Image (spheres, rainbow, N blue to C red):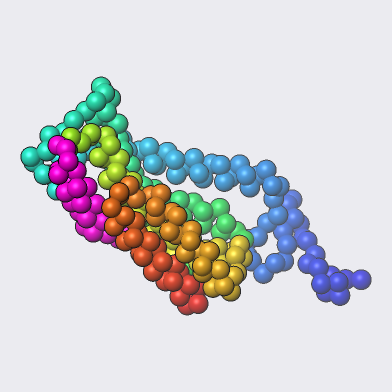
């Protein structure tokens, strides 16, 4: 009985001796699982190296960036306080992480595309090519909202409430940690539309499942916003939760369009 009668696809041997399957995807080749794992490891290593390079490149400019952040959100009247010898250096490294993530996240999607390209149809490859610049733009949009909307509200209310009871003396590292958590967190979570579309495209989750599980998704969004935003007034958490809910609904719209 031939392959057309059984519904199976017959393998053929290519020039390299590997079995290629007529799956309709040009260049699709069957390889051992370990070969895929090694390739994925190498591509993730490239992203990690680029992340480190981004930190190194931005480190000489991080001191000026910290002064600008302090002047923007805290004010010149508040003195920086360092409580350990390495606190200033660690704070600068955390600030450099923002720049490194901005250039590494698009590279992550590109390496993911290169890893899966052999098994993708032409229309799926075009989708991945569009994802790379969109990832960078979404990261910048997320950090911009965190910088211009969430951080001013958070610091204004924290200093306002603490000023009535005690003199605020802010640690450099803790302050920069709060800033980097907000900026990096917003940049990363704004990748949500791309991740949702990718998961549906790859068959990891069904579109109808996402629609039916809205309550569960919103509960996870609320829990995540409470974790990522260190604001005792809960104003920043509410803003984050609303933005994530909007992003999720936007993701469902993108799934329908693509």
> At x 63% / y 47%, what residue is drawn?
36
> At x 35% / y 38%, what residue is drawn?
53
Q: Looking at the image, which residue sits at the far top?
A: 85
Q: Is residue 158 above or below residue 218?
A: above
Q: Is residue 147 magenta?
A: yes
**How far across and down, in percent of the image, does residue 63 sit?**
19, 36
> At x 78% / y 61%, what residue is drawn?
11
**How far across and down, in percent of the image, does residue 164 sit?**
14, 44
Pick the front one: 101 or 89: 89
For the question of whether residue 199 can be seen, the reply is yes
> At x 41% / y 66%, what residue is drawn?
245
**How far across and down, in percent of the image, does residue 24 sit?**
67, 69
Q: Looking at the image, which residue sits at the far bottom?
A: 257
Does residue 93 appear to the left or right of 228 in the view shown?
left
For the question of whether residue 188 can be seen, the reply is no
Pick the front one: 173 or 237: 237
Q: Quadrant of the N terminus?
A: bottom right
Q: Looking at the image, which residue sits at the far front?
A: 165
Q: Looking at the image, which residue sits at the far right?
A: 1
Quarter of image, res 8: bottom right
**How far across and down, in percent of the image, does residue 171 sit?**
23, 34
Q: Is residue 148 magenta?
A: yes
Q: Which residues are magenta?
A: 140-167
Quarter of image, res 223: bottom left
């Amino acid at each position: 009985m031939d392959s057309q009668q059984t519904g199976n696809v017959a393998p053929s041997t290519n020039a390299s001796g590997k079995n290629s399957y007529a799956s309709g995807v040009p260049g699709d080749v069957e390889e051992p699982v370990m070969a895929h794992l090694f390739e994925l490891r190498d591509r993730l290593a490239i992203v990690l190296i680029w992340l480190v390079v981004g930190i190194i490149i931005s480190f000489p400019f991080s001191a000026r960036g910290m002064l600008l952040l302090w002047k923007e959100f805290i004010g010149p009247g508040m003195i920086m306080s360092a409580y350990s010898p390495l606190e200033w250096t660690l704070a600068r490294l955390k600030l450099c992480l923002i720049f490194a993530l901005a250039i590494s996240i698009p590279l992550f999607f590109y390496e993911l595309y290169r890893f899966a390209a052999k098994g993708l149809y032409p229309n799926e490859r075009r989708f991945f090519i569009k994802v790379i610049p969109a990832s960078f733009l979404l990261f910048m949009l997320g950090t911009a909202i965190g910088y211009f909307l969430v951080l001013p509200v958070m610091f204004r209310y924290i200093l306002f409430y603490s000023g009535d009871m005690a003199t605020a003396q802010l640690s450099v590292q803790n302050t920069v940690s709060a800033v980097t958590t907000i900026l990096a967190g917003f940049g990363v979570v704004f990748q949500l539309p791309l991740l949702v579309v990718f998961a549906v495209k790859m068959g990891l989750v069904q579109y109808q499942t996402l629609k039916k599980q809205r309550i569960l998704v919103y509960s996870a969004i609320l829990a995540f916003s409470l974790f990522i935003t260190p604001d005792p007034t809960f104003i920043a958490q509410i803003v984050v939760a609303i933005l994530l809910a909007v992003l999720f609904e936007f993701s469902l719209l993108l799934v329908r369009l693509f």
